[in-house]
């Protein structure tokens, strides 16, 4: 399979998740906000998740991002570290790229849990961040200045080139000189005053005390000097802000120095300044220096890391020593007394900002980075597990419907009998081969096979023989909603009876074929338990007993697999269940936790089988062999609302759902059921096939795509004609009638992407599958 290339016109945007340790006011937060404004929404979509919040942290960035339409997920604020790791492990697979900021501690443990990971970009604003933490899962490290990039490279031996430099950016359009007069008036600054300002978080490493000490020296000799400190207290060190205010008062600066707190109007505030001061030690590339340059201001700065890249002494600003308020005051005097020098330095810095740090200069670097890291994903494809990638499923439900007066136990469905497939199995299999379909799903009908403890195989042996004669590989459903009438599904006896039946099925399959057998022990454990245990829709029509039934079905599946393996240790198992997406209504955000709980419930059947949930029932990883995901047009819906379809703004691409599922389990996968009725059949198949290919390009090893049902059938409840198959329900001498648009779509796929998939499949005599099976059970 080819590697990821330029996106096709119909591809969804590249989804990018920025993960913050905390979301406050700073350079990285500004970077994300400017990216969200500048990136083409048709090509990129940014979401943000923040992991920690301390009382006193500003909410300003949350509000600004949401105003831009960026989703800001703060669910981890109420979680422990371990719960946050679990939450991120469930969230990040849905993204094409993850960008972690502030050396967030939660991201690596989350990624370690996944079987497929989106490319990780670490973004560092401090040398200490670049030197901290592991780097083995980091696809690229972005330092905002040279020293940070070099520090990261020192931690990436053999991959030093994966540490790169992208400076913080500034939106020059936000800086309007015409705002100067009105902003100065609001601050009470007259034309005759020289306004010297500082902007940032009130943090000791930023040395704001030195700004105040220098202000006192300047005030003593220049009555026109005025000062502003813009920014709120650091939530981890709130006492520092108090100390600063106390020191300013002690120095007699109350009449000339203002503490403005956090502000959203930084560009307009900077227009009101005459001089900007920045005296930090041990930081990266100060975003605020570039903002000061965008406002055309001269800057007084210490020789700190990235500041030295921005400020050339005497050309774009003035450099002063660390911890030296007197030198700061000297530089201030020089600029106060020389308006021409202020203009020269400010203009030179603005030109540098325009050339190196503007949105126009920096955003293309991010775009190239996103495209590059997406292309690093290793594509996967089918391994030869099945004889054909495109497959067909014969609807084989055999459950009883609601009791009626005429039938107290309820009418019994038999979908195989309804279309005569049991009689015409060989013709059906051979007709499907004409469309490139050599692997099918079919079913045992327990109610016909077992009677009073004895087995009659006359309903299935001809089908087994038909499969052998036609060269068709069959995945056999052992339980597809129906069971004999003398069994109570709620009792332990049900598990024992099912295990006995499953073992007997394995023996008859072994009698008729030497091929490695495939079984679906219990079809749709999660859906079955919901429909029969909670919704009262399927037999036994219960309410409030869904999870109880789910555990019972999982126990039965485990016991059935043990019985099958005792007969044929080569046996493989496909566990089929719907994959879903439950979306919170944007107008009811308080329902997010409940909606996500419903979404997570889709995994419970697989989690029970694998022992991740309730291991006391006997589940273990060896039982979770091949995961079969069932996907239809109504598998996504608004919580408390209607289903959503392709084209809805909240619709999640199928490729994303496939990636999320594989990331969770790391098992071979197939699309075990998909289809739609009437005229959308061809378009739906094409969509699903394209999404399957996209998932494989992202690294998901999909083994097959099963159209289900492959033959039209009558509706369960109303017997209406469901036109949802490739073949007609009725059969003539020449076979079943073909739905030509769907046949053409299958043929087009098999000539295009399907042919390329087949080229990548290594010939498999069966030994490799046996080895895989044994390894899974080791």
Image (cartoon, helix red, strand yellow):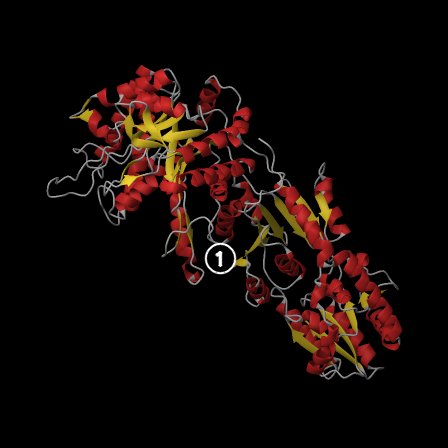
Pick the residue in front: 171 or 722: 722
Can I make out residue 506 in this image? Answer: no
The picture quadrant where one finds residue 359 is bottom right
In the rendering, at what x and y percent does residue 269 appear? 70, 73
Identify which residue is drawn at 25% across, 43% down.
Answer: 538
Decide if residue 638 is in sight here.
Answer: yes
Vertical order, 310 against 333 (above or below): above
What residue appears at the point 34 percent right and 20 percent down from the top-left corner? 467
Horizontal and vertical percent position of residue 246 = 69, 77
**Which image quadrant: the C terminus?**
top left
Q: Quadrant of the N terminus?
A: top right
Number of marks present in the image shown = 1
- Quarter of the image holding residue 29? bottom right
Residue 7 place in picture, x, y as percent: 59, 43
Which residue is under mark 1?
75
- Who is closer to the viewer here, 11 or 139? 11
Q: Work out whether 332 lies above or below 544.
A: below
Q: In terms of image quadrants, where is residue 27? A: bottom right
Q: Position of residue 457 (x, y in %)?
A: 23, 20
The crowding category of the residue bearing disc 1, from other C-alpha atoms within 10 Å (few below 14, some 14 to 19, many at least 20), is some
Q: Nearer the viewer, residue 303 or 631?
A: 631
Q: Tell whether 650 sits left or right of 105.
A: left
Secondary structure, mark 1, is helix
Relative side of 45 to 654, left or right: right
In the image, residue 749 sits, relative to residue 175, either above or below, namely: above
């Amino acid at each position: 399979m080819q590697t990821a290339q330029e996106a096709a016109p119909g591809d969804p945007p590249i989804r990018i998740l920025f993960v913050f340790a905390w979301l406050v006011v700073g350079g990285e937060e500004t970077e994300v906000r400017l990216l969200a404004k500048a990136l083409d929404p048709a090509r990129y979509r940014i979401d943000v998740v923040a992991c920690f919040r301390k009382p006193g942290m500003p909410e300003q960035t949350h509000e600004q991002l949401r105003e831009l339409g960026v989703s800001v997920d703060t669910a981890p604020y109420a979680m422990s570290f371990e719960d946050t790791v679990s939450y991120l492990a469930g969230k990040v697979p849905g993204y094409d790229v993850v960008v972690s900021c502030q050396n967030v501690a939660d991201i690596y443990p989350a990624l370690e849990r996944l079987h497929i990971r989106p490319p990780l970009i670490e973004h560092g604003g401090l040398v200490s961040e670049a030197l901290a933490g592991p780097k083995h899962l980091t696809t690229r490290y972005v330092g905002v200045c040279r020293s940070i990039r070099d520090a990261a490279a020192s931690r990436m031996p053999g991959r030093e080139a994966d540490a790169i430099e992208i400076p913080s950016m500034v939106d020059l359009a936000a800086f309007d000189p015409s705002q100067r007069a009105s902003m100065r008036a609001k601050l009470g600054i007259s034309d005759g005053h020289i306004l010297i300002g500082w902007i940032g978080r009130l943090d000791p490493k930023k040395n704001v005390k030195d700004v105040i000490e220098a202000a006192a020296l300047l005030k003593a000799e220049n009555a026109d000097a005025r000062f502003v400190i813009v920014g709120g207290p650091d939530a981890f060190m709130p006492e520092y802000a108090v100390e600063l205010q106390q020191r300013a008062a002690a120095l007699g600066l109350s009449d000339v120095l203002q503490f403005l707190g956090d502000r959203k109007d930084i560009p307009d505030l900077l227009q009101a300044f005459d001089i900007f001061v920045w005296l930090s030690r041990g930081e990266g590339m100060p975003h605020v220096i570039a903002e000061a340059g965008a406002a055309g201001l001269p800057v007084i700065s210490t020789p700190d890391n990235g500041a030295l890249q921005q400020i050339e002494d005497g050309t774009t600003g003035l450099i002063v020593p660390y911890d030296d308020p007197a030198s700061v005051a000297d530089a201030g005097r020089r600029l106060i007394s020389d308006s021409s020098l202020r203009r020269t330095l400010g203009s030179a810095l603005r030109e540098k900002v325009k050339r190196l740090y503007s949105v126009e200069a920096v955003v293309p670097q991010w775009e190239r980075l996103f495209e590059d890291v997406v292309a690093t994903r290793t594509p996967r494809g089918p391994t030869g597990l099945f004889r054909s990638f495109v497959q067909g499923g014969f609807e084989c439900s055999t459950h009883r419907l609601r009791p009626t007066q005429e039938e107290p136990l309820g009418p019994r469905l038999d979908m195989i009998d309804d279309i005569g497939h049991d009689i015409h199995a060989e013709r059906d299999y051979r007709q499907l081969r004409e469309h490139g379909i050599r692997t099918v799903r079919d079913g045992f009908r327990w109610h016909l096979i077992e009677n009073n403890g004895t087995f009659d195989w006359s309903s299935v042996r001809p089908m087994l023989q038909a499969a052998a004669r036609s060269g068709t590989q069959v995945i056999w459903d052992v339980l597809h909603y129906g069971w004999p009438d003398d069994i109570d599904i709620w009792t332990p006896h049900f598990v024992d009876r099912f295990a006995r039946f499953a073992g007997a099925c394995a023996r008859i399959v072994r009698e008729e074929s030497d091929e490695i057998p495939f079984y679906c022990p219990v079809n749709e454990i999660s859906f079955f338990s919901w429909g029969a245990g909670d919704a009262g829709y399927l037999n036994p029509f219960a309410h409030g007993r869904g999870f109880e039934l789910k555990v019972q079905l999982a126990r039965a599946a485990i016991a059935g697999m043990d019985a099958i393996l005792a007969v044929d240790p080569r046996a493989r198992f496909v566990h089929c269940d719907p994959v879903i997406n439950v979306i919170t209504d944007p107008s009811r955000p308080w329902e997010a936790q409940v909606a996500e709980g419903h979404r997570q419930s889709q995994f419970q059947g697989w989690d029970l089988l694998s022992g991740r949930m309730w291991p006391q029932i006997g589940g273990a990883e060896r039982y979770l062999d091949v995961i079969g995901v069932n996907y239809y047009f109504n598998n996504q819906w608004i919580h408390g609302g209607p289903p959503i379809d392709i084209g809805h703004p909240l619709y999640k691409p199928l490729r994303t759902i496939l990636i999320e599922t594989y990331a969770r389990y790391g098992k071979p996968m197939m699309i075990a059921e998909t289809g739609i009725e009437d005229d959308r059949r061809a378009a739906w198949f094409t969509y699903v096939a394209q999404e399957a290919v996209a998932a494989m390009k992202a690294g998901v090893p999909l083994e097959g795509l099963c159209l289900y049902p492959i033959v039209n059938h009558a509706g369960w409840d109303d017997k209406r004609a469901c036109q949802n198959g490739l073949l007609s329900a009725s059969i003539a001498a020449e076979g079943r009638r073909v739905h030509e648009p769907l046949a053409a779509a299958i043929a087009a796929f098999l000539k295009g992407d399907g042919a390329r998939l087949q080229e990548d499949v290594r010939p498999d005599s069966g030994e490799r599958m046996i080895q895989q099976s044994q390894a899974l059970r080791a």
